[in-house]
Image (spheres, rainbow, N blue to C red):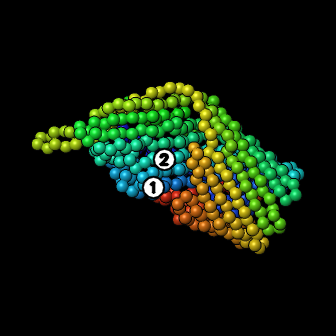
Amino acid sequence: MKRRTILFFFAIISGISLNAQHNLGIHMMNGLYQQSFHNPAMFPDSNMVIALPSAFLNIYHSGGSLGDFITENESGESEIQIDELASKIGDENELVTNIDIHTFEFSIPVKDFSFSIGHVFRNDFVLNYDRSFVQLLSDGNAQYIGETVEFGPSLDFQSYSEIRLGVGYRFANIKVGARLKILSGIGDISPVSNNAKLTTSDDIYQIQLESDYAINSAAYLDFNVEDGFDWVGEDLSAGDFVSKNTGIAVDLGLSAKLGNKLTASVGINDLGSIKWSEGVKNFSSNVNKSYDSIFDLMLDGDSLSVVNNFENLTEALEFRESNESYSTMLPMKVNAAITYQLTNSFSVGAASQMINYDQQNYTSFSIGGNYNFRKNFSAGVAYVSHQDSNTIGVSLMGRIGPAQIFLVTDNIITAFDPINSQFGNVGAGFNLIF
């Protein structure tokens, strides 16, 4: 089970770490259509825009860099070294990775209104795990003799397709915007409960195993006693635009010019949910039983050794499977920004973002400036604080004729190597402006 579990988590991480979510630096890029991704009120005043594919990556691991623990095995496969992981992580750890891939978007102004239509592929991944879980995988329960240890990782992974219909209205110095999003679920893993604990007797080393553990899944998980949980997700296809896993969400936004130089905005995104009814599997474990030690004694000639027998714990948890539909809320996002135009070429500003995953908030804050070197080229630098990471962000934007290209990151040092950073993100895209 140990190897299968590690490869399962790594398969998810490696499958999504090539993709993305927005960056705070976008708030400083005046004239960039992708600002409206954070806030539907940030629509262009007069230009028609065709936003061609753009992608954004965000990855954060509280226990350090993933690259610290990943090596290549004898088969040439990348895998996490569990022994290294246990010695470096904290008591409680979280891994967060986000995807936001915009395939296209079209926006057109009509007098004081703005109308838009677009499509996005999204993934949101959150893994919470304790040091005790990793130590059990690595060294079994001998280290907990005479103790009770709680374990049980919580994995939340949601992948879906989104068709977006937006409308905005401008009056005086105020813009308001709203976006309706029609959701089609691709796959999901949602924790229901993750309570499990082992008590190891200091007399005969017997284990008392108790669990109240449940997972909902659609299209991504399978389970059998011998191998444990396995990843069964497939690559994206045209059929993922529409599925029987459906939902509705909305984005709301407000932007106001406070005088000639100051602009403030706030947007609330992803107010909605998805109902999962296709490819659904529910797994639950509710046991309270005694079980033989995780370790077995083996006699090899004159040598007595201890062998890890952790695979038996999978069978002991006695997971049951059902097929009942369920619903999940989208991770709500709140974005706020303020900018001040010091000169015709130079502006300063601050931005913040709060994302809520399963009643847990993740916050980011940035402050910086942006300079227009020429009419069609600008660059920005910002200080960014994300959870417990402090980084330097950089944004670049250029335009030749109707073609506009941009590159943005909240951590310039690791923008192109997020796997070797505790926190990193990068975004890039291409627009046509008429």
164 is higher (above) or lower (below) than 219: below
In this view, the residue in front, 195 or 118, is: 195
User: Which corner quadrant holds the C terminus?
Assistant: bottom right
Residue 277 placement: quadrant: top right
Q: Position of residue 299 (x, y in %)?
A: 16, 39
Q: Residue at x 42, y 52 (%)?
A: 91
Q: Is residue 367 left or right of residue 81?
A: right
Query: How many labels sit on residues?
Result: 2
Label 2 environment density (alpha carbons within 10 Å; few <14, some 14–19, many ≥20): some
In this view, the residue in front, 325 or 410, is: 325
Q: Is residue 433 left or right of residue 330?
A: right
Residue sticking out furthest to the left: 302
Q: Position of residue 202 (x, y in %)?
A: 26, 42
Q: Specify the amino acid type for callout 1.
A: Gly
Q: Position of residue 163 (x, y in %)?
A: 70, 40
356 is higher (above) or lower (below) than 25: above
Q: In the rendered structure, which disc, 2 or 1, sits on the residue that comes first in sequence? A: 1
103 is higher (above) or lower (below) than 418: above
Q: Secondary structure at mark 2?
A: strand
Q: Report the disc number at residue 298.
A: none
Q: Position of residue 191 (x, y in %)?
A: 51, 38
In this view, the residue in front, 275 or 202, is: 202
Q: Specify the amino acid type for callout 2.
A: Asn
Q: Secondary structure at mark 1?
A: loop
Label 1 environment density (alpha carbons within 10 Å; few <14, some 14–19, many ≥20): some
Q: Residue at x 57, y 59 (%)?
A: 386
Report the residue marked by disc 1: 63
Q: Is residue 190 visible?
A: yes
- Rounded to the nearest angstrom, the CA distance separating label 2 from label 1 is 11 Å
In this view, the residue in front, 373 or 223, is: 223
Report the residue marked by disc 2: 128
